Image (cartoon, rainbow, N blue to C red):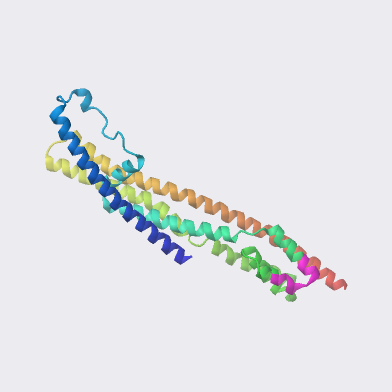
Amino acid sequence: MKKVIALLTIAVVLMLGISKQVYSQEEEIENQEVQTEETIEQEIAPPPTAATLTAPTTEGKTFHQVLKEKFIEGGPEFMGIILLTLIFGLALAIERIIYLNLSTTNTKKLLDKVQSSLKTGGIEAAKDVCKNTRGPVASIFYQGLDRYNEGIDVVEKSIVSYGGVLMGRLEKGLSWISLFIALAPMLGFLGTVVGMVQAFDAIEAAGDISPTIVAGGIKVALLTTVFGLIVAIILQIFYNYILSKIDSLVNDMEDSTTTFVELLVKSDMKNEKK
């Protein structure tokens, strides 16, 4: 799984670098075309009126282009760190989702196989079934079958202790995802505070409270908060999905282990009668 995280991180970084180069080239071409069109229009068109001056300048731009422009306006210092939190958080979340999906087992089908194996081949046959089945439930069953000769009480204790170990494995990495969820908006707020300080420094240097200086500085400062909150929202959605998946697996483990112990008790009683 560590290799998966590394490959995902490298792929995302490469894609971001390539897209940045491509879009920078597109921006240069678009700027050259716009400058050429503006010079031609200035030579042909009449002087601009109030209506033309108030026309929107973002017309014709896609959402991706606007998002990229706002990201660049926010500054590379805090925007880059926020982007890294998104990349690492998504990598951990995807790794957990893949692991949890691979850990999902059809417990009803597994219990039927174990029950039929106990009837036909005994404990060893049931252990082979659990060994060839993927998932934490099968591992718990195998631990219980391995301690079957020591008594049902020992089986129950081993199931409980090993179940706690498996629950820890299911929750591995969640603390890092929650850290990135909390870190992204905090970095955004920090960028906002730094941007506000820079805006007031610009006002002090200009010696005049110009609306242009104030509005521009505040806009750039607030962009880091916006992107930080967006990253936190995205990671929070993945985090809640992972928690719900873990809860489902844990409930399935508890229900199936209860039924499994009952099967072992019935099998033990039948062996004593014989």
Identify the residue at image location x=16%, y=33%: 40
**Vertical placement of 204 versus 175: above or below?**
above
Between 197 and 110, the residue placed more toward the observer is 110
Q: Which residues are magenta?
A: 116-128
Q: Is residue 106 left or right of residue 272?
A: left
Q: Is residue 10 left or right of residue 144?
A: left
Between 90 and 240, the residue placed more toward the observer is 90
Q: Is residue 134 visible?
A: yes
**Vertical placement of 241 versus 115: above or below?**
above
Identify the residue at image location x=56%, y=59%: 100
Quadrant of res 217: top left
Q: Is residue 123 magenta?
A: yes
Residue farthest along the bottom direction in this orientation? 149
The x, y position of residue 240, in whole percent, is 51, 50
Q: In the rendered view of the protein, which quadrant contains the C terminus?
A: bottom right
Quadrant of res 89: bottom left
Dominant SS type (magenta): helix
The x, y position of residue 272, in whole percent, is 85, 73
Q: Is residue 214 magenta?
A: no
**Vertical placement of 32 versus 119: above or below?**
above
